[in-house]
Amino acid sequence: MVLRNLSKIWSCILNGSRNIFKIDTIDKLIIFATLFSMDIGAKLLKVFHGSVNFELTKYAKQKLFIIYLLLVAYPIVDEEDNAWLWVVIRDLHTSFIMLFDKYSIEDLPSQDQFLIIQFYIKIITVLKVEISSHIYEVLRSFFKRLYTHESLSNMF
């Protein structure tokens, strides 16, 4: 609960118009990505257990972008000094699997689906995890919809 509150507090600070806080070091990125990973993982577990609905708010998207940036920076993150970080990221990965197992992302707006799939692909790439046949079908289905959706298929 304390970590969830910290996540909310820091989201407000990062979005405050008077407060400027830059994530300008790898250490800050690690701290915020860890904090936000725990928060999003906890929210996904609540969705899985049916206590809240899943939606990607502006703040949730911002948190995913910060975590994504950490995943992009993976090659420069010292794995030995930050072993705990990858435990948290693996837990977040597990939370996404639980979400995919119970709910379809097809009901979400296309942009949100794209963000979730992009994020998930990055996480499995960094963690080097095998995907289940169900996750494979989730990904295949998304890309098929992307290809056949008229307004999306013309993007490229």
Image (tube, helix red, strand yellow):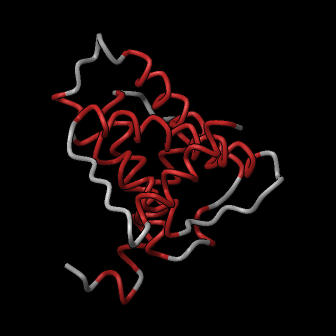
For the point 45% across and 53% down, which residue is it?
A: 63
Front in this rendered view, residue 155 or 4 = 4
Q: Nearer the viewer, residue 35 or 115?
A: 35
Residue visible at 60% across and 41% down in the picture: 41
Q: Please indicate whether residue 115 sits to the left or right of residue 80 in the image.
A: right
Q: Residue at x 31, y 81 (%)?
A: 153
| Residue 145 x/y as whole percent | 45, 72
Looking at the image, residue 138 lies above or below residue 147: above
Residue 18 lies in quadrant = bottom left
Q: Quadrant of the N terminus?
A: top right
- Quarter of the picture containing the C terminus is bottom left
> Residue 9: x percent and y percent?
55, 52
Where residue 24 appears, as percent x and y from the top left, is 21, 45
Q: Is residue 74 above or below residue 106?
A: above
Furthest toward the front, the residue is: 18
x and y percentages locating residue 10 in the rendered image: 49, 51
Q: Quadrant of residue 108?
A: bottom right
Furthest toward the top, the residue is: 80
Residue at the outermost left position: 76
Q: Nearer the viewer, residue 131 or 123?
A: 123
User: Relative to 75, is 67 on the left or the right?
Assistant: right
Q: Is residue 93 found left or right of 103 in the rendered image?
A: left
Judge left or right: residue 69 versus residue 144: left
Q: Which residue is painted at 52% across and 59% down in the image?
A: 60
Q: What is the total number of numbered labels drawn onto the structure image?
A: 0
